[in-house]
Every structure is written in structure tokens, then in C-alpha cells.
Amino acid sequence: MKKPILFALLLSLSFAISCKNDKKENTEAEGTTTEENVVEPVEETVNEDVKKIKIKLEPKSDSKVNGSAVFTETEGKVTMVAVFDGLTPGTHAIHLHEKSDCSAPDGTSTGGHWNPTNEPHGKWGDVKGYHKGDIGNFEADENGNGTITFSTDQWCIGCGDPNKDILDKAVIVHQGADDFTSQPTGDAGGRVSCGGIINLE
């Protein structure tokens, strides 16, 4: 009677050990598979080439107009953000002119509007034509402060394309508004502030 009981105990013990080993092997196998299938996240680094130039504008024609402008190029587009003080309240024209030379007291050393494609003067985007420097008008408040933001893919900073490159041009603020009609300047009046777009790096 003792032998069958002993045999049954040994059989049960053997079965339990076998199950435990199978479970351990399965766990190890599963663990191995899991480790092999782990995919490490890959961080993509985008090297975006951003160009930036900040310029100061100084008073011209006996005005008191000071200002600053920041030009930023990213993803093929240049954005200009300009801020001014000392203006007479009302509408003022702002243009890019041919040369960065602001030495003349009246700002005329900058030449005419930047117009590399020899178009007539006009409002930016006009199908009849416009200068690459015809930015447009902005408003000065009752305290003489004004700001303008302008973006375009028709400019670049230092790309070397004579039809797009704004380096060595000048920002000119005029006493009056651009009428977008009179040739070749828009009858915007005297030049009251000037800043050369020069890369100082």
C-alpha cells in the first residue's frame, strides 16, 4: 500500500518540477523576444538654417525719427518687423532703397527704390508691377510711434541672387504716404529715417 502512494507522490513532484521548468523557459523565451522587439525611439534633428539681421534707423531731413528693424529668413521667407518713434501721427511710406549708404543728411545717398526687375512703382503684389522695395504704408499713433510687419518669399538674406538679396540695401521711412501711383516714388515725401541692411558678422 505504501508503494503506490510513494509512486503517486514522486509522479506529482516530477510533474510539478517539469511545469515549473517549462514556465521558466517560456518566461525567458518571452523576455528574449520582448527585448529583441523593443524599438528605440529615434529623435530627428532638423537643422533649420535661420538667418537674422537687426538694424537701427537714424533720423534724416531734420526729423526725430528713430527706429529698428529685424529681418529673419526661415523656410524660404523673409519677415521684417520694424518699430519707430518720433514720427508725425498718420500714414507713412516705407521702402527698401538701392544702397545701404545713409550718410546724406536727407537720406538721398541710398538712391532710389530697390527695383532689380525694372518694374513700375506700385502696391506690393499689383499685377501691373511693383518694385521689390515697395513695402507700403504703416500708421503712426498720436504719440508718433509706429510698427510694421512684412513677410515675403521674394527676398532673401545673403543668397547672392541680385533679384532677391536685400543685403546692402537700405530701409527708408518717408514723411508722407505712398499713393502707389505716382512714378517712380509714390509721392511719399522726404526721407525721415534711414538704416542700412548690413551684415556685421
Image (cartoon, rainbow, N blue to C red):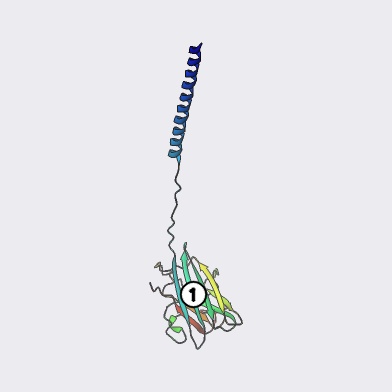
User: Outermost residue, bottom direction?
Assistant: 62
Looking at the picture, does residue 98 appear above or below residue 24? below
Residue 112's spot in the image, x, y percent?
46, 79
Q: Quadrant of residue 103?
A: bottom left
User: Outermost residue, top direction?
Assistant: 1
Q: Nearer the viewer, residue 2 or 147?
A: 2
Q: Secondary structure at mark 1?
A: strand
Q: Is residue 181 visible?
A: no
Looking at the picture, does residue 106 appear above or below residue 115? below
Q: Residue at x 41, y 80 (%)?
A: 101
Residue beneath label 1, please? 69
User: Outermost residue, right direction?
Assistant: 142
Looking at the picture, does residue 22 appear above or below residue 124? above
Q: Is residue 20 visible?
A: yes
Q: Residues within 10 Å of mark 1 (few under 14, many from 20)?
A: many
Residue 175's spot in the image, x, y percent?
54, 83
Looking at the picture, does residue 54 appear above or below residue 15? below
Q: Amino acid at mark 1?
A: Ala
Q: Residue at x 52, y 68 (%)?
A: 151
Q: Nearer the viewer, residue 16 or 3?
A: 3
Q: Nearer the viewer, residue 69 or 33?
A: 33
